[in-house]
């Protein structure tokens, strides 16, 4: 897939300056970077939630997007999941995997942060998208749910062949799940590498970033 | 004081005719004005909160100003418009229950609309982001937004209702507090206190406070239900 170059300006400040980029179809790409480096902005624009300065979405793909803070609609957990498709078999596979079976009839508004994130992931994976964009999907989850999520995401990719972007603050996660890593620094993709290349950073910023993680 | 309270309880217990008339007029006025305000205010508030058009911010500021409009000012405007020198004098509405309802609708609708608007404003981005991220159609996502507002509609209504029933300045001006015709609880309390007969005032005060208590109990139940 091809992302055409774009910029995004908030209140007169350019927070994202993204060049044209090619990503091989069906790959999983982790997006990493410090707070405020523009990861969420990038995710929202690729997903078509926000418009870049030009007003034209840089990719023309049917995208599914999980926001950094997931929203639970005022209805049961099961209804929330089934909002996005009526295949109950598919729903069952997902919520059983994510350990939501006991919570299905609960009002989704009362879920804990991690439970809400698990529900939101199930809900999103109910449909087939060409492009999946997940903004820190496991940030609120415990280790078990994180592992299950990663498995689900990989299975989803294998089944649908879609391209996946995962914003993450965990390099361990990036290593476990992704084919390549995109490092955003002050609103620019400063470095892009295969996951195996994480131990050989080319830019100074990325080297310092990796140092914090003890890589 | 002691005997006034005793007499007040007696009035309530015996179902005093004038007291009943006052309660009846109050009920007609308050229920009509609050329901009309609900029917106008909720769609208006949701529209203001959820839409995006030039001038929206200005409308919100105007509405918030109207929310805080002193009732006597509202009464004054309607008094001037419908009095013998006003443009609407031919309607002969001044000092009727109908004009009290109309004036109260003007007073309360901004409150219903404003509370709805700020609630919708608070959730619209999350709802839109989540629904759009799933690829849900605009219409369905609007219904989802409305579904989020159900309990807010109740509390906005009760807010309008309690403003209506407790308000005195506006209805006194346009209604004239005429006994057996336009006298409502609040204006009657003023009137009878001025005459020095406290008992009916106290009786009405007890009823008003009981209604306020009831409304607050309802509100807290709604809030509890909303979070379950
Ligand atoms: N709606 C907005 N209005 C103004 N500025 C914004 C807006 N959204 C984001 N920004 C700014 O854009 C920059 C990038 O924000 P973004 O949310 O993309 O960061 P991030 O990389 O996702 O950070 P985090 O790791 O904290 O999630 C930040 O400096 C932020 O303050
Ligand atoms: Mg972010």
Image (spheres, coloured by chain):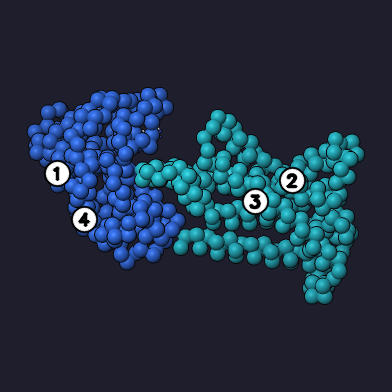
Chain colours: A blue, B cyan
Name the chain letter of the residue that bears numbered label 3. Answer: B
Work out whether disc 4 and disc 1 sit on a shared chain. Answer: yes
The residue at which mark 1 appears reads as: A175
Quarter of the image where the N terminus of chain B is located: bottom right
Answer whether labels 4 and 1 touch (C-beta < 8 Å).
no
Q: Secondary structure at mark 2?
A: helix
Report, in whole angstroms, how far the alpha carbon at label 1 lies from the one at label 3: 55 Å
Please say if A14 is above or below A177: above
The image position of residue B102, as x and y in percent, is 76, 47
Crowding at dot 1, Cα within 10 Å, few <14 / some 14-19 / many 20+, comes out as some
State how many labels appear: 4
CA distance separating discs 3 and 2? 18 Å
Numbered tag placed on residue B104 in the rendering: none
Question: What residue sits right under mark 4 in the picture?
Answer: A148
For the residues beneath circles 2 and 1, the answer to whether they share a chain is no
Question: Foreground mark, 1 or 3?
Answer: 3
């Amino acid at each position: 897939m091809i992302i055409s170059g774009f910029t995004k300006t908030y209140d007169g400040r350019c927070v994202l300056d993204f060049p044209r980029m090619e990503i091989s179809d069906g790959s999983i790409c982790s997006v990493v970077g410090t707070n405020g480096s523009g990861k969420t902005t990038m995710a929202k624009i690729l997903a078509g939630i926000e418009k870049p300065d030009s007003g034209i979405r840089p990719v023309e793909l049917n995208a599914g997007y999980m926001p950094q803070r997931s929203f639970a609609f005022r209805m049961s957990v099961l209804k929330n999941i089934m909002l996005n498709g009526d295949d109950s078999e598919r729903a069952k596979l997902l919520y059983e995997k994510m350990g939501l079976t006991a919570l299905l009839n609960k009002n989704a508004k009362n879920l804990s942060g991690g439970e809400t994130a698990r529900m939101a992931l199930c809900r999103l994976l109910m449909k087939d998208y060409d492009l999946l964009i997940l903004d820190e999907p496991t940030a609120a989850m415990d280790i078990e749910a994180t592992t299950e999520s990663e498995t689900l995401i990989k299975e989803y990719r294998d089944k649908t062949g879609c391209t996946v972007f995962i914003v993450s603050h965990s390099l361990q996660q990036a290593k476990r799940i992704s084919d390549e890593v995109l490092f955003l620094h002050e609103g620019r993709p400063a470095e892009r590498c295969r996951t195996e290349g994480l131990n050989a950073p080319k830019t100074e910023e990325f080297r310092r970033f990796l140092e914090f993680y003890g890589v | 004081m002691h005997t006034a309270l005793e007499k007040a309880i007696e009035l309530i217990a015996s179902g005093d005719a004038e007291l009943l008339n006052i309660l009846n007029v109050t009920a007609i006025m308050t229920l009509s004005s609050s329901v009309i305000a609900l029917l106008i205010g909720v769609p208006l508030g949701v529209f203001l909160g959820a839409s995006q058009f030039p001038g929206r911010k200005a409308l919100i500021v105007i509405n918030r100003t109207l929310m805080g409009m002193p009732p006597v000012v509202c009464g004054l405007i309607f008094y001037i418009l419908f009095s013998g020198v006003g443009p609407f004098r031919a309607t002969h509405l001044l000092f009727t229950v109908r004009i009290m309802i109309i004036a109260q609708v003007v007073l309360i609708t901004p409150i219903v609309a404003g509370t709805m608007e700020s609630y919708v404003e608070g959730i619209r981005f999350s709802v839109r982001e989540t629904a759009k991220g799933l690829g849900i159609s605009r219409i369905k996502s609007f219904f989802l937004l409305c579904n989020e507002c159900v309990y807010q509609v109740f509390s906005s209504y009760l807010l309008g209702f309690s403003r209506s029933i407790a308000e005195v300045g506006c209805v006194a001006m346009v209604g004239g507090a005429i006994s057996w015709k336009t006298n409502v609880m609040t204006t009657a309390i003023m009137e009878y206190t001025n005459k020095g007969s406290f008992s009916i005032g106290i009786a009405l005060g007890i009823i008003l406070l009981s209604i306020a208590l009831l409304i607050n109990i309802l509100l807290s139940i709604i809030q509890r239900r909303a979070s379950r």
